[in-house]
């Protein structure tokens, strides 16, 4: 019995690879395994080579691992001219050729004989390579099989049938999921294809490989969720009912999920003319008394800088989502990077303050989105969730019970009409909305337009307690100090009243530390496990509180180790810079391990980075990963 | 829930309620046309039966943007060019609010031009007053999108090479359902038009000619104006799109020659507002969204019901 299965399905984008893999991943989860999915796709609409990887094991899996052990290579229908049924371009063998490098020794290859010819197979030296690597190759006419019982696109199903047979899986979960997803003739045809492929494979092949699906054992019900799902559901449970946006990958996922669900829950979603408008709409809706959010990715978020500042100055609560992708400018639209940290922390004019959380896994994405809403509405400050294309698209299973909590429609520091009657007003009857005199934690209570006795002016200019534009120096200082107090109060609340939003790995007394943030967390945690298994003494912290910064936790962590490596997906060590800026020391303790080629870290790269760093070798780990030495080196 | 239900309440509303107490006093220059807008709003709002607390005025940045500093309603003085997106979201969040957006020609037709076109296209039920003084006032007299061709300013010292924007025609083409032009120098007409605009269900765009004696001494707004509804020379049907379009063209042409035509140009009463359209397709709740937060009996759906799709 193998300890894990990493199944890769490869083919043309637009060929239904996503939905097929989603179902297969769920089937594995239902059989009791922990799963993790990784999606690779190019920035084009149809065609182009794509794959999805599913890692399944009887233990927590938080990264895609290194390499994989089962390839289902479908053949790219969009590389073909549909009229003549002839291939054009040179993409037809990519589902084979592009995937072989990462296939582990002893791995299995199933390829579609109906679309990938013997010539193609020879062109990539498959047989020789298979011999060298001890791969088991199973050519099957998936396309023919699909056509015979239904339609050509159903060759995915045939592929799943073959997979199940080769791995000795039960078809039960797969069948269930199919009947959930479709019905009628389509379901019939798919089931037929599934069974036919299964039986045929069982009859025709002797299985000389020992790869099997591990046995899993969940005790409670699991849900398979992406980071985008988790953020969207976190927002719903936080009471968010207004979203405005403009599509941009990968933010579009959150935008779409909420747009599809809001009509049923009385929420409003608006797709608008640009990102300035999107964030300004969220400000307007929040001002009018609705928990609202907007978001974008790098370039679109740049446009939101203005309304973000407006929200800060007018103390309008707001949640913004920043789903990073590789930049600068339009960068690599479908590739992850963690390089917008400084952009998100410091964009917008003035002594600008906001709350920034960087969740590192699916649970954190849900929890921190909820937390962001709560803090934004309690403290009347914008809160930003920063994550990336990797976390956005990957799916992992989460215990359903984890989500079981109440919706939170509370508008935080907002007064009722009864309370407004008691509140301070000026002599013309205006509510002292920005009253710095009895503010607590920097928060002055607010009213909502329409409420009696709550009239005030909100303005992006500096203003007096009732909201009149004011350049009075004393007022300026008082207002500024009150607003600045918020971040300190939030820091105190996070430290004293709440569970830490930071996540720790490895033994407490380890003497080497790895620090990371956001979606690199999964690969780091696995690398730490491996290093400790090899006898090293390594621990890790994955930091989520970017602003206000997790000062106490990171200080304690850095003080407790001799040396540390900061792992992040960007070229300029932005997070390490933040630590140094916030803590003002530790510059000589921290080395950076950086990756910015468009692909996320894999655990082995972090292990290697550690080894190179520890051995103090004068070389870079691999061509794709960089070490930036500690200050003073 | 009573917080938002003040609309329709029976009581006399005094115009003074819209005027703040001692401060702040307007900082506009003597003779500025902006006083005219303020005055007509203070007259029109009570006549339209609105209490200060059910009105939200959203302004941009510019001399014009200060409007709600001197008008005692709920107000949101936003940023340059962005009053419309803020205003329309407030209206979607709480349709019971009377939402009035206002700003300058630079603010609304320049930097905010994109929002103007899309707000008109969607026909949001808000009133939009553009203080059109054909100049940037607050930043001291630069050429604006409505300044005439050849207009000289510090930033276009040889005279603007650009043809001015046609706000009325642009608005009509974009989809506004009420379009009028009025002028600060004609207070009675201005008040009536603003009142109509407030009462109109849909995007009501009022191009309000406001003189800027400080920076735009040549502005045509000083010359006598003609009310196209009062004059026998102009006979067109305000409900007819083609006739309205022609009248707007003429109005915009002759303005450059020094003839100021004002009045209602287009009124489309039967076009549903954006929130009605959105409601019809099932994307807008029956009750004002903002009310749910104050309603202890409101049912809040939970995300974990959605989780079933993922198990
Ligand atoms: C993003 C941005 N750009 C520029 C400015 C500077 N600015 C303030 S008001 C204004 C123009 C004002 O002209 P207009 O909108 O016609 O209004 P008026 O002052 O004439 O009423 C400009 C350019 C700003 N505040 N924000
Ligand atoms: S500069 Fe012009 S627009 Fe501004 S207040 Fe003075 S007169 Fe009015």
Image (tube, rainbow, N blue to C red):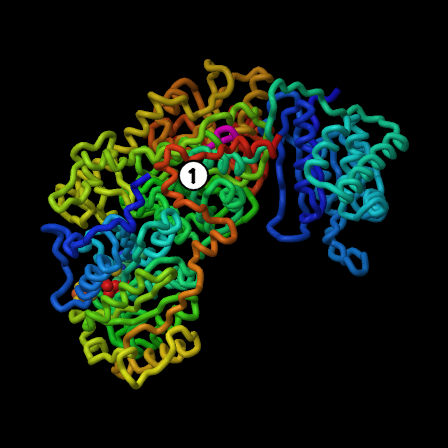
Q: Residue A583's quadrant in the figure?
A: top left
SS for callout 1: loop
**Residue A84: image location, x then y, percent:** 81, 60
In the rendered view, does A553 fall on the left or right side of A258?
left
In the displayed structure, B175 sits above or below A227; it is below
In the image, farthest residue toward the right:
A204
Q: Which quarter of the rendered image does ligand 1 occupy?
A: bottom left
Residue A630, can we see it? no
Whether residue A264 sits left or right of residue A455 in the image: it is right
Disc 1 packing (10 Å; few <14; some 14–19; many ≥20): many
Which quadrant, please, contains the N terminus of chain B? Answer: top left
Residues shaded magenta: A358-364
**Chain letter of disc 1 in the image:** A
Q: Residue at position x 60%, y 50% from top?
A: A43
Point out the residue furthest to the bottom here.
B233
x and y percentages locating residue A447 in the rendered image: 26, 40
- From where the camera sits, is residue A609 visible? yes
The residue that mark 1 highlights is A240
In the rendered image, residue A363 lying in the magenta stretch gets the answer yes
Give the side of residue B212 with respect to residue A49, left or right: left
The quarter of the displayed image where residue A243 is located = top left
Q: Nearer the viewer, residue B180 or A41?
A: B180
Q: Position of residue A432 (x, y in %)?
A: 18, 40
Q: Nearer the viewer, residue A367 or B8?
A: B8
């Amino acid at each position: 019995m193998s300890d894990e299965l990493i199944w890769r399905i490869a083919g043309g984008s637009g060929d239904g690879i996503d939905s097929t893999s989603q179902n297969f991943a769920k089937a594995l989860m239902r059989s009791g395994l922990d799963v993790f999915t990784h999606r690779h796709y190019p920035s084009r609409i149809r065609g182009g080579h794509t794959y999805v990887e599913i890692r399944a094991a009887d233990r927590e899996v938080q990264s895609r691992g290194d390499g994989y052990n089962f390839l289902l290579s479908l053949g790219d229908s969009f590389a073909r001219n549909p009229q003549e049924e002839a291939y054009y371009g040179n993409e037809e063998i990519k589902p084979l050729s592009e995937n072989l490098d990462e296939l582990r020794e002893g791995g299995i290859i199933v390829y579609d004989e109906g679309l990938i010819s013997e010539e193609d197979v020879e062109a990539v030296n498959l047989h020789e390579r298979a011999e060298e690597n001890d791969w088991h190759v199973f050519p099957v006419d998936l396309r023919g099989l699909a056509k015979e019982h239904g339609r050509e696109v159903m060759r995915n199903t045939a592929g799943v049938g073959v997979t199940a047979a080769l791995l000795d899986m039960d078809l039960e979960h797969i069948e269930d999921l199919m009947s959930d997803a479709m019905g009628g003739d389509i379901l019939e045809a798919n089931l037929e294809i599934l069974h036919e492929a299964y039986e045929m494979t069982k009859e025709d092949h002797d299985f000389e490989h020992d790869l099997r699906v591990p046995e899993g054992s969940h005790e409670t019900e699991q849900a398979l969720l992406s980071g985008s799902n988790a953020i969207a559901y976190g927002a719903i449970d936080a009471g968010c009912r207004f979203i405005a946006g403009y599509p941009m990958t990968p933010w579009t996922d959150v935008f779409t999920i909420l747009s599809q669900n809001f009509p049923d829950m009385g929420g409003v979603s608006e797709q608008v003319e640009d990102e300035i408008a999107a964030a300004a709409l969220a400000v307007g809706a929040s001002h009018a008394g609705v928990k609202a959010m907007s978001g974008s990715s790098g370039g679109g978020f740049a446009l939101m800088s203005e309304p973000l500042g407006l929200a800060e100055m007018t103390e309008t609560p707001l949640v913004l989502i920043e789903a990073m992708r590789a930049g600068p400018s339009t960068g690599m639209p479908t590739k992850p990077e963690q390089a917008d940290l400084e952009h998100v922390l410091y964009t917008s004019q003035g002594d600008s303050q906001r709350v920034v959380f960087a969740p590192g896994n699916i649970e954190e994405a849900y929890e921190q989105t909820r937390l962001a809403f709560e803090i934004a509405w309690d403290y009347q400050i914008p809160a930003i969730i920063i994550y990336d294309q990797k976390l956005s698209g990957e799916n992992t299973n989460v215990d359903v019970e984890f989500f079981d909590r109440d919706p939170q429609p509370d508008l935080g520091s907002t007064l009722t009409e009864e309370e407004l009657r008691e509140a301070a007003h000026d002599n013309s009857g205006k509510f002292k909305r920005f009253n710095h005199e009895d503010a607590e934690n920097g928060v002055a209570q607010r009213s909502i337009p329409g409420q009696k006795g709550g009239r005030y002016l909100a303005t992006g200019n500096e203003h007096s307690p009732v909201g009149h534009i004011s350049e009075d120096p004393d007022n300026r200082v008082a207002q500024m100090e009150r607003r600045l107090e918020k971040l300190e109060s939030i820091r105190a609340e996070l430290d004293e009243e709440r569970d830490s939003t930071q996540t720790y790995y490895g033994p407490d007394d380890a003497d080497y530390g790895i620090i990371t943030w956001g979606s690199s967390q999964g690969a780091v945690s696995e690398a730490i496990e491996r290093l400790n298994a090899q006898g090293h003494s390594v621990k890790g912290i994955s930091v989520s509180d970017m602003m206000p910064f997790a000062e106490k936790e990171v200080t304690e962590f850095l003080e407790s180790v001799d040396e540390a490596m900061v792992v992040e997906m960007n070229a300029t060590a932005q997070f390490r810079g933040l630590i140094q800026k916030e803590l003002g020391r530790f510059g000589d303790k921290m080395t950076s391990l950086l990756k910015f080629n468009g692909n996320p870290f894999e655990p082995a790269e972090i292990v290697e980075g550690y080894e190179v760093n520890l051995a103090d070798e004068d070389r870079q780990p691999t061509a794709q990963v960089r070490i930036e030495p500690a200050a003073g080196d | 829930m009573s917080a938002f239900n003040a609309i329709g309440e029976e009581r006399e509303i005094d115009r003074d309620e819209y005027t703040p107490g001692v401060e702040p006093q307007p900082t506009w220059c003597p003779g500025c046309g902006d006083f005219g807008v303020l005055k007509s709003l203070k007259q029109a709002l009570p006549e339209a039966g609105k209490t200060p607390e059910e009105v939200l005025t959203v302004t941009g940045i510019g001399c014009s943007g200060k409007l709600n500093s001197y008008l005692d309603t709920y107000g949101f003085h936003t940023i340059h060019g962005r009053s419309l997106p803020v205003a329309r979201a407030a209206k979607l969040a709480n349709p019971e609010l009377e939402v009035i957006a206002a700003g300058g020609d630079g603010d609304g037709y320049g930097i905010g031009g994109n929002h103007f076109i899309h707000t008109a296209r969607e026909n949001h039920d808000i009133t939009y007053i553009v203080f059109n003084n054909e100049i940037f006032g607050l930043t001291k007299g630069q050429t604006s999108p409505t300044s005439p061709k050849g207009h000289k300013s510090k930033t276009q010292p040889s005279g603007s090479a650009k043809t001015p924007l046609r706000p009325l025609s642009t608005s009509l083409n974009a989809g506004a359902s009420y379009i009028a032009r009025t002028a600060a120098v004609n207070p009675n007409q201005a008040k009536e038009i603003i009142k109509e605009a407030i009462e109109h269900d849909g995007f009501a765009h009022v191009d309000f000619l406001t003189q800027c004696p400080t920076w735009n001494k040549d502005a045509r707004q000083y010359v006598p104006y003609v009310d196209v509804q009062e004059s026998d020379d102009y006979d067109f049907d305000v409900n007819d799109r083609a006739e309205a379009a022609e009248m707007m063209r003429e109005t915009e042409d002759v303005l450059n020659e020094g003839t100021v035509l004002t009045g209602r140009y287009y009124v489309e009463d039967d076009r549903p507002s954006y929130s009605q359209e959105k409601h019809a397709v099932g994307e807008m709740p029956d009750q004002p969204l903002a009310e749910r937060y104050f309603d202890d009996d409101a049912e809040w759906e939970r995300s974990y019901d959605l989780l079933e799709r993922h198990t």
